Amino acid sequence: AWTGEIRGRVVCDVCGDASVGPEDHVLQGAEVAVLCITKSGDVLNYQAFTNLKGIYKVAETMPESDRWVSCLARPVSSFHEHCTQRGDAHSGIKFSYNRPSGHSHTVKPFLYKPASTPLYC
């Protein structure tokens, strides 16, 4: 059998500068959707929520002949009261999945920004 894992983080980009810095914080409970296409052409849809550290993970064990070929990860929503606006222009990140069994693919962080930028920014 083959096992794949996709992981990433969701962060509140407090100053809206499109980079993760010391003023930013992770978002717990943010929802992320991951769609993967397998070698046989099946489309698998996963739903994940971030943990206390803002990290989400999806994993699957399947026959090697039916493993993931490419995936699309996209942020769905942030339930944080001050940080709900999508901070990046991209609706998702598409990538080829070519990791050997037991290894994970890390997606760059998804950013949300507050409705109003703090004065210290």
Image (spheres, rainbow, N blue to C red):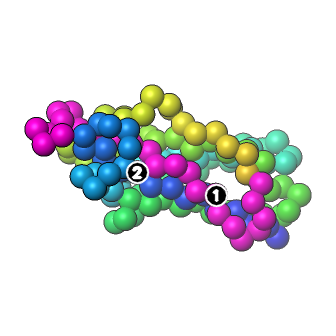
How many neighbours does mark 2 have within 10 angstroms: few (below 14), some (14-19), or many (20 or more)? many
* Residue 25 appears anywhere in the view: yes
Q: Main secondary structure of the magenta part?
A: loop
- Measured as percent of width and height from the top left, residue 39 is found at 84, 48
Most extreme residue toward the left, as rendered? 119
Q: CA distance from mark 2 to mark 1?
A: 15 Å
Mark 1 lies on residue? 105
Q: Nearer the viewer, residue 32 or 98?
A: 98
Mark 2 lies on residue? 10
- Residue at 37%, 65% in the rendered image: 53
How many neighbours does mark 1 have within 10 angstroms: few (below 14), some (14-19), or many (20 or more)? some
Numbered disc 2: secondary structure: strand
Q: Nearer the viewer, residue 53 or 117?
A: 117
- Residue at 75%, 60% in the rendered image: 99
- Measured as percent of width and height from the top left, residue 38 is found at 79, 48
Numbered disc 1: secondary structure: strand
Tell which circle, 2 or 1, labels the residue nearer the N-terminal end.
2
Image quarter for residue 55? bottom left
Q: Nearer the viewer, residue 80 or 120?
A: 120
- What amino acid type is highlighted by mark number 2? Val
Is the N terminus in the top left, top right, bottom left or bottom right quadrant?
bottom right
**In the image, residue 47 lies in the stretch drawn in magenta:** no
- Measured as percent of width and height from the top left, residue 103 is found at 69, 67
Most extreme residue toward the right, as rendered? 65
* Residue 79 appears anywhere in the view: no
Q: Which region of the structure is painted magenta?
A: 98-121
- What amino acid type is highlighted by mark number 1? His
